[in-house]
Image (spheres, grey):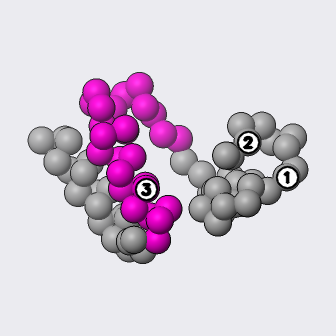
């Protein structure tokens, strides 16, 4: 779980969640505009890609390539 509030000072246990909280604190986050995505894109397309990264099945280079490919395919 990643806290939604800046006032929470406890870091999550999971590596990915902890890295996300640290990046957010350093201003290294980005806005995900779920309402502007095609229906099902977040859950059905991006979700499985994030899961592969979280499970260490792919590395960040593969993750970026898969996300870029998914966005390009959705844009068509």
- Magenta part of the protein: which range? 31-56
Q: Residues within 10 Å of mark 1 (few under 14, many from 20)?
A: few
Disc 3 element? helix
Q: In the image, what residue occupies the spot 30% across and 32% down?
A: 40
Rendering coords of residue 35 (x, y %)? 41, 25
Q: In the image, what residue occupies the spot 47% across and 65% down?
A: 55
Determine which residue is flagged by label 1. 10
Q: Kindly report the secondary structure that dominates the magenta region of the rendered protein.
A: helix
Identify whether 46 is placed above or below 16. Answer: above
Q: In the image, what residue occupies the spot 17% across and 48% down?
A: 73
Q: Is residue 33 magenta?
A: yes
User: In front here: 30 or 16?
Assistant: 16
Determine which residue is flagged by label 2. 3
Disc 2 element? loop
Q: Is residue 12 left or right of residue 67?
A: right
Rendering coords of residue 32 (x, y %)? 48, 39
Which is more N-terminal, label 1 or label 3?
A: 1
């Amino acid at each position: 779980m990643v806290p939604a509030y800046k006032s929470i000072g406890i870091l999550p246990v999971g590596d990915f969640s902890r890295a996300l909280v640290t990046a957010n604190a350093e201003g290294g986050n980005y806005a995900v505009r779920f309402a502007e995505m095609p229906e099902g894109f977040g859950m059905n397309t991006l979700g499985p890609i994030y899961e592969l990264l979280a499970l260490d099945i792919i590395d960040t280079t593969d993750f970026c390539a898969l996300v870029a490919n998914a966005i390009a395919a959705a844009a068509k």
